[in-house]
């Protein structure tokens, strides 16, 4: 699943959420445009609904709600994002902020 996580320090949770949604809209719009005429757009749109988008709290909650604790996910943090430092920061935020929340919820 695509992960559009924003855990930038120094901004509010709402600003993180808004920036993550902006990044997701831009990346997914490019993706859909590239696939236009090659796939059924409705199938692509439904598949993209599985993207995890928002700040750390949002992404953890979406994972808890959408996936079974035994599911194994392939997470794409670099989808149309070629800023290596940002991709690494997003992956680190996922492992330090999101993964522990999801693991705790799965253990309950």
Image (tube, grey):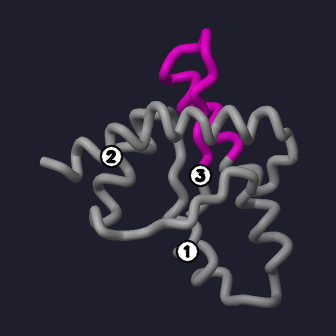
49 is higher (above) or lower (below) than 54:
below
Mark 3 or mark 2: whose residue is earlier in sequence = 3
Q: CA distance from mark 1 to mark 2?
A: 22 Å
Residue placed most toward the observer, 42 or 78: 78
Point 41% across, 43% down: residue:
99
Q: Residue furthest top?
A: 10
Asked if residue 43 is among those painted magenta in the image, a careful observer would answer no
Can you give x and y, in whole percent of width and height, for residue 54 in the image? 52, 39
Say which residue label 2 marks: 102
Q: Is residue 15 left or right of residue 31?
A: left
Residue placed most toward the observer, 26 or 2: 2
Q: Nearer the viewer, mark 1 or mark 3?
A: 3
Please rate how many residues cluster around mark 3, counting C-alpha atoms within 10 Å: few if below 14, some from 14 to 19, many from 20: many
Q: CA distance from mark 1 to mark 3?
A: 13 Å
Residue placed most toward the observer, 66 or 22: 66
Point 75% across, 52% down: residue:
78
Q: CA distance from mark 3 to mark 2?
A: 15 Å
Q: Nearer the viewer, mark 3 or mark 2?
A: 2
Q: Secondary structure at mark 2?
A: helix
90 is higher (above) or lower (below) than 38:
above
75 is higher (above) or lower (below) than 33:
above
Q: Secondary structure at mark 3?
A: strand
> Which stretch did the figure color magenta?
3-23
Say which residue label 3 marks: 3
Say which residue label 1 marks: 47
Mark 1 or mark 3: whose residue is earlier in sequence = 3
Asked if residue 12 is among those painted magenta in the image, a careful observer would answer yes
């Amino acid at each position: 699943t695509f992960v559009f996580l924003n855990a930038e320090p120094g901004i509010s949770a709402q600003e993180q959420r808004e920036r993550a949604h902006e990044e997701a809209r831009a990346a997914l719009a490019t993706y859909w445009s590239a696939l236009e005429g090659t796939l059924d757009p409705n199938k692509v749109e439904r598949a993209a609904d599985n993207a995890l988008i928002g700040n750390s709290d949002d992404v953890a909650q979406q994972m808890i709600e959408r996936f079974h604790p035994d599911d194994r996910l392939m997470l794409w943090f670099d989808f149309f994002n070629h800023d290596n430092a940002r991709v690494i920061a997003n992956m680190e935020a996922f492992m330090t902020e999101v993964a522990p929340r999801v693991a705790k919820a799965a253990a309950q």
